[in-house]
Each structure stands twice: as structure tokens, then as C-alpha cells.
Amino acid sequence: MTQGIHHVAVRVTDLERSVAFYERHFDLHVASRMTLASGADIAFLAHPAGGAQLELIAGLTDHHPGDGLVHHVAFGADDVPALFARLRAAGVPTLEDAPQRLANGRQLFSCRGPDGERLQVSGG
């Protein structure tokens, strides 16, 4: 039996830039950092409310052709339109012109992180 999602790992080109991005825009903080034997640097980011962590990895050299790409990392938000406006004002690329409202009442939008990773925000 599983215990839920522990973390999602995303390859990044500049660890410090990506850490700053997720701290500034998604209220995450560095929970731990380490350098792997391969020389890759990683940072695990956590949210004050808990839940799964985001692992950022810079400098990996063992990418295999079959390695998948993360389609998106989803963040929950209390006020989706406000976060959308804040991110756009900060110059974060969004994939829609406004949050979408789903049939179940939830709102969502997608944006891009520093390395082009797709990020989704959902709430409501």
C-alpha cells in the first residue's frame, strides 16, 4: 500500500534560479539540499502546509532516452485569479489569458517555470 506522493523531481539548468522562482511565486522553502555522488546538486522544496515536496535537480548526466518528462506539477491555491494576476504581473509566462472554470466549479491555469516546465494552478 502506498502512502501518497512523496515528491516530484524536475530537472533544472540553474538550481539557484529555480529555487528563487518557487520560493517567490509558490511559497515553497528549501527543506534540504545535497550533492549526489555524480556531482548533481539537488534541493527539496516544501510548503508550510505540508504535502508532497518538489525536488529540483541540476547537473544530472545520466539522462536515458526512455526517461519521461514531467507533464506538469500542480499547485493548489485559495484564490486562483489573484495568483494568476500576481504571476502575470511578475512576468511569469502563462499559457492562458485567464483562469479556466471547469464544470465542477474549480478554476485552473498553467504557466511556465524557469526551464520551461509546465506548472498548473488549481483551486476553488
Image (cartoon, rainbow, N blue to C red):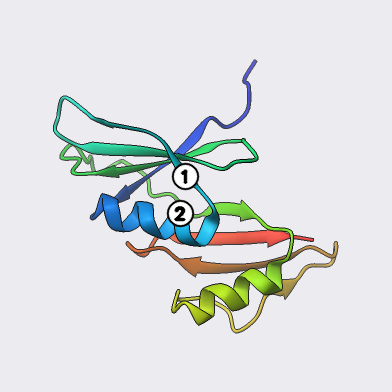
Badge 2, how many Cα within 10 Å: few under 14, some, many 20+?
some
Residue type, mark 1 in image: His
Q: Residue at x 15, y 40 (%)?
A: 61
Asked whether disc 1 touches disc 2, contact meaning CB atoms under 8 Å apart, the reply is yes
| Residue that label 1 marks | 29
Tell me where residue 66 appears, x and y as whole percent.
30, 41
Decide if residue 80 is on the left or right side of residue 47.
Answer: right
* Image quadrant where one finds the N terminus: top right
From mark 1 to mark 2, how far is it between C-alphas? 6 Å
Which structural element holds mark 2? helix
Vertically, is 113 above or below 38?
below
Q: Residue at x 20, y 40 (%)?
A: 60
| Res 67 quadrant in image | top left
Residue type, mark 2 in image: Glu
Give the numbered dot on residue 23. Answer: 2
Residue with the most extreme right position: 104
Q: Residue at x 34, y 55 (%)?
A: 18
Decide if residue 116 is on the left or right side of residue 49.
Answer: left
Residue with the most extreme top position: 1
